[in-house]
Amino acid sequence: MIDTHTHADSRSSEDFDLMYTSGIDTAITCSFYPYKLRNQTCLINHFDRILEYDTKRAEEYGLKLEVALGLHPANVSENNDQIYEEIRRLVEEKKIVAIGEIGLDDNTINEQKAFKKQLEIAEDTKSKVIIHTPRKNKKEVLKDIKIIVDETINPKLVVIDHINPNVVEDVIDYDYTLGLTVQPQKMTKEEAIKILDKYGFNKFLLNSDISNKPSDPISVPKTVRTLKKLGYKNSDIEKVAFKNAKKFFKI
């Protein structure tokens, strides 16, 4: 199985062990710095930690970490040029499988500028992107995310993440790949399964978004096993368990 959105830097070695023994072979870890940034160097150090340290921590327990790095909307400042240069370098050196997570949270002008700039880098380098949608005002903010995405990048390069029953209709007919986050306070596995049952398995990825907030490191295996118990076809289950992710991220 592949968990397509995690924040491994905020999780313990015991979580990695649990994930691997529960059937997760690979996880994609995204950047997000949960504290106020004093300067751009802090975020670059955060990137380095994920690439050089957390991947090795996970590997000790059998879990392969693929890495997505980007400027999360919560980390946007007035001047982000050094971060953009670093993201482009990491993409060009093939150190990351996607730019992410990026997106909009409070939907400020600075957030929109940073989001668009990173999409431009992705379009220019033909990189995949993982796009954050917020917990609050998700439907309204998603409208602006779609506008900026459609103006800037090939939608086939895009994952729009944290999709839930309230907004799935707003994105299902576009060429985006859609992330379903099964996490306490976000969406239950039953809600995710209802979405898959209604819209099919071809466009979706599963993830736990484990972070410093309430999380379940094995929400992906729980969802996959529940699908199996309910009698869904193995060929469909495999799409959200790993096949869609392998194809999209080329991992």
Image (tube, rainbow, N blue to C red):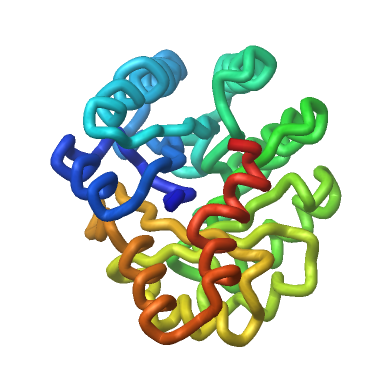
Asked if residue 179 lies left or right of residue 116, the reply is left
Please tell me which residue lies in front, 23 or 74.
23
Q: Position of residue 120 (x, y in %)?
A: 77, 33
Looking at this view, name the residue that lies furthest to the left. Answer: 14
Position of residue 26 relative to residue 133, above or below, is above
Total labels drawn:
0
Image quadrant in which the C terminus is located: top right
- Pick the front one: 235 or 96: 235
For image coordinates 39% across by 33% down, the residue present is: 64
The reply, left or right, for residue 152 in relation to residue 56 is right
Residue 215 is left or right of residue 115, and the answer is left
Question: Looking at this rendering, what residue extends furthest in the front direction?
Answer: 234
* Residue situated in front as seen by the camera: 234 or 117: 234
At x 59%, y 71%, the residue is 236
239 lies above or below 236: above
Q: Is residue 199 visible?
A: yes
- State the image coordinates of residue 237 (x, y, percent, origin top left): 52, 69
Residue 188 visible in this rendered orientation of the protein = no
Residue 111 image offset from top left, x and y in percent: 59, 43
* Vertical placement of residue 41 versus 59, above or below: above
Residue beneath the point at 29% across and 33% down:
62
**Place of residue 16 in the rendered image (x, y in percent of width and height, measured from the top left):** 24, 40
Residue found 43% across the figure and 35% down from its top: 31
